[in-house]
Image (cartoon, coloured by chain):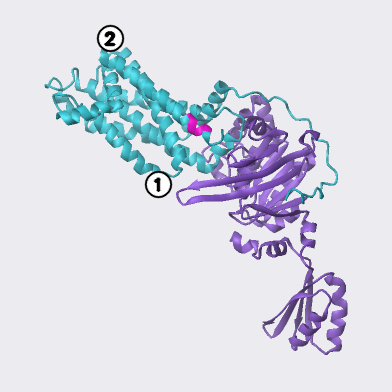
Chain colours: A cyan, B purple
Amino acid sequence: MTDTTMQTGTPGAMPAARPRPKARRAANPLRDTLLVFRRAIGISVRNPVWLVMGAAQPLLYIFLFGPLLTKFAGMPGFPPGNAWQVFVPAILVLLGLFGGAFAGFGLISEWRDGVIDRMRVTPMSRFALLFGRVLRDVAVLVVQAVLLVLAGVLMGLRAPVAGVIVGIIIVAVMGVTMSAAGYAVALKVKSEDALAPLVNGIMVPLMLLAGVMLPITKGLAPDWLYYLSRVNPVVYVVEGTRAAFQGQFASGHFWIGIAVAAALAAVGVTVASRTFTRMSR
Amino acid sequence: MTPSDGAEMIRARGLAKTYRGRKGAVEAVRGVDLDVRRGEIVGFLGPNGAGKTTTLQMLTTLLEPTSGQATVAGHDLRRDPAAVRRAIGYVAQGGSAGSDARVGEELIFQAQFYGMGAADARRRAEELLQRLDLSGLGGRDVKTLSGGQKRRLDIALGLMHSPELIFLDEPTTGLDPQSRSNMWGHIADLRRTAGTTVFITTHYLDEADALCDRILVIDGGRIIAEGTPDELKRGVSGDLVTITVLSDPDAALVLARRLPGATEPVCEPDGDAYTVTFRVPEGERIIIGLLRDLDAAGVPLSGVSVRRPTLDDVFLTLTGRTLREEAA
């Protein structure tokens, strides 16, 4: 085929190419991340429906399920502290878990619009394409978390402010993991229909085994369930956030929670950024 | 021709992509060689599933080739994909603007993705909005645009960084005829005003004919023909002559068969009349004698037409299929 290549049919008069701006630079991951973040957050702020929808379910739990727990406080097997100090942190982790799923759905719609491929053809850092979006998700998560804490306060939550702030930070770190994982999975399946059962199949057991609704303690749960829950990394994040809400910054639960959240985030971002990169190197 | 002389914009050799799935390997592209020179408008023509988009995605760094190599805008596709990305623009088949985004912001961010400063980006966005008949739409949400407007926005996004080479994947699919011809004008303008090299895939023959200096025909993952539209048409044996007679079609058929070089004579009833069609080289010259002979034989004529071969005929000759039925 090479031999038959004809070089005929060249354009008649070719104008001199206009000088092109040479403002091109090497990929700058930080600048690129900020650009991707700014674009994404702008769109989120203008379309706050996802922000509200993501927070609606956890809000319902606080209003319609939380009150059931108030009598449990102080019972044998129930973690120490006010029932709201136990429940609200867990609901924040729940929010972080499902935030990742919403991130995945959002990415599929962007992919369908052609936005992902358009960005992948730019010289931007591959890591930035992912991490800029993750940062947007974390920002949205923090706003939702503040909303949930305020709802908790309305219902009777009393907790040290520093503890609540640190708790939200732990949840934000957890959100990094879930959002990155949501993107990695979404890029693989590329269809909402495939993502939805996957989300339910993974998130619901993770949520239940983390003792989000009712703490899974030795005093409340049968042994097999208790030990099964210890395999779930999310349980440590829940316990760490609970410890933070009680201001127990010196406790083992607190530091283990932080360590697990950070480790999960590191793994999540690494895996997801590999997926983003492998799509095109 | 070496890539270093600056005249070569794309040079691909043996570019291939095999997808491995559960049902075995699918060879989407089976070794494509192609050369595009600076300033050319080249059409990549083929039915759906021929491998057009896959080839394009390889040339734009979106897909890693299974084998083969390519130099795009002077940079090696495998060794320096980032340099290729800086030099090219790409307008995907399904569009590329976020539906919830604002038109103007989407354009400005796109320029910044390439390292342009905010002020330059704003100026460039304004310029392109105007050039692509999108003036005043900068503040609108993308999802409120019409099909034609949205497609022009896609093109504007691909042009924000003034690439020397732009890939357009089916830029007019789904547009109404007026938007299509309008789009052709914009594409032709790219070279006229900025010397941009354009690589365009299409399954519309009229589009390839109207826009392209040169056409590559791809089918089944291979390039099966290449040349200017005229060269390709010359490969088809002759013009298509259609004669309508009110009666005695057999006499017309016999006379047609006698013409030197006549092929594919067919006679079909057409209402009260009959049409006789055949292909013959230099149909316009040869038809004069034929009409005289038909008249002398007393065959009542009611119409005659001579049609130059179209790219549709080219495709039919090359593959035995029409593009249209494939595209439908």
Residue denoted by label 1: A193
Which residue shows up at 22% across the image and 33% down it?
Answer: A64
Please tell me whether residue B232 is drawn above or below residue B148 in the rendered image.
below
| Percent coordinates x, y for residue A8 in the rendering | 82, 49
What secondary structure is the stretch in magenta mostly built from?
helix
Which quarter shows the C terminus of chain A?
top right
For the residues labelled 2 and 1, the Cα–Cα distance comes to 45 Å
| Residue A58 quadrant | top left
Residue denoted by label 2: A250
Residue B156 located within the stretch drawn in magenta:
no
Instruction: Specify whether A255 is left or right of B232.
Output: left
Q: Amino acid at mark 2?
A: Ala
| Percent coordinates x, y for residue A161 in the rendering | 31, 14
Question: Which residues lie in the magenta part?
Answer: A273-277
Q: How many marks?
A: 2
Which residue shows up at 26% across the image and 13% down it?
Answer: A252
Q: Residues within 10 Å of mark 1 (few under 14, many from 20)?
A: few
Q: Secondary structure at mark 1?
A: helix
